[in-house]
Image: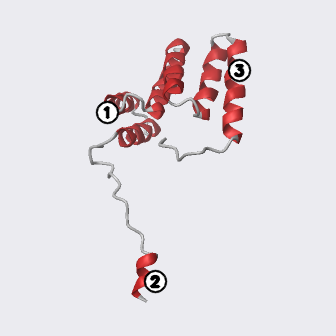
């Protein structure tokens, strides 16, 4: 009987509380997303930048910095961040879709179509390895 319960016991993952300082890039990125949802964009930007200081190839943080730039009306800066995120993780479909939107805003329609097609292909293709995106 003990073996049965032990087999199905789940270890509780320690999640950072909202007040606790994040310890890794993914945690900073998550906190930044929560801050955006709360309207604290500058604090969110600081969290995304902190994520990149810990992991310079953290594509979700790069994408979120691109999203902040795009929302602020700076499509050129957004493209820079989206392209950096794609360089870090070429199989991240959402970044390709966001890049397509930025290209469209800049009038770069051929590139927008290519980026959206790439996003569509990636979206339907199953991933071979677990994602580290958060």
Q: Give left or right: position of 5 versus 70.
A: left
Q: Give left or right: position of 77 versus 106.
A: left
Q: Position of residue 127 (x, y in %)?
A: 61, 44
Residue 54: assigned label:
1
Q: Mark 2 vs mark 3: which is more N-terminal?
A: 2
Mark 2, residue position: 4
Residue 114: assigned label:
3
Q: Which of the 4 quarters of the picture holds residue 122? A: top right
Q: Residues within 10 Å of mark 3 (few under 14, many from 20)?
A: some
- Are discs 3 and 1 less than 8 Å apart at CB? no
Task: Give the CA distance from mark 2 to mark 3.
Answer: 52 Å
Please determine whether, in this image, residue 89 is positioned above or below residue 70.
Answer: below
Q: Position of residue 64 (x, y in %)?
A: 48, 30
Q: Position of residue 24 (x, y in %)?
A: 33, 41
Disc 3 element: helix
Task: Give the CA distance from mark 3 to mark 1.
Answer: 32 Å
Residue lying at 65% horizontally and 22% vertically, measured from the top left:
100
Disc 1 element: helix
Q: Residues within 10 Å of mark 1 (few under 14, many from 20)?
A: some
| Camera-nearest residue between 37 and 54 | 54
Q: Residue furthest top?
A: 107
| Camera-nearest residue between 87 and 97 | 87
| Camera-nearest residue between 65 and 89 | 89
Q: Which of the 4 quarters of the picture holds residue 91? A: top right
Q: Nearer the viewer, mark 2 or mark 3?
A: 2
């Amino acid at each position: 009987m003990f073996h049965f319960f032990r087999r199905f016991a789940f270890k509780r993952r320690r999640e950072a509380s909202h007040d606790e300082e994040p310890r890794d890039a993914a945690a900073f990125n998550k906190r930044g997303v929560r801050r955006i949802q709360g309207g604290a964009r500058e604090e969110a930007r600081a969290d995304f930048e902190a994520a990149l200081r810990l992991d310079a190839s953290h594509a979700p943080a790069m994408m979120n910095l691109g999203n902040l730039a795009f929302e602020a009306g700076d499509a050129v800066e957004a493209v820079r961040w989206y392209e950096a995120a794609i360089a870090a993780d070429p199989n991240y479909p959402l970044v390709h879709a966001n890049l397509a939107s930025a290209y469209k805003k800049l009038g770069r329609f051929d590139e927008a179509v290519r980026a959206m097609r790439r996003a569509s292909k990636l979206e339907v293709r199953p991933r071979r390895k677990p994602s580290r995106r958060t």
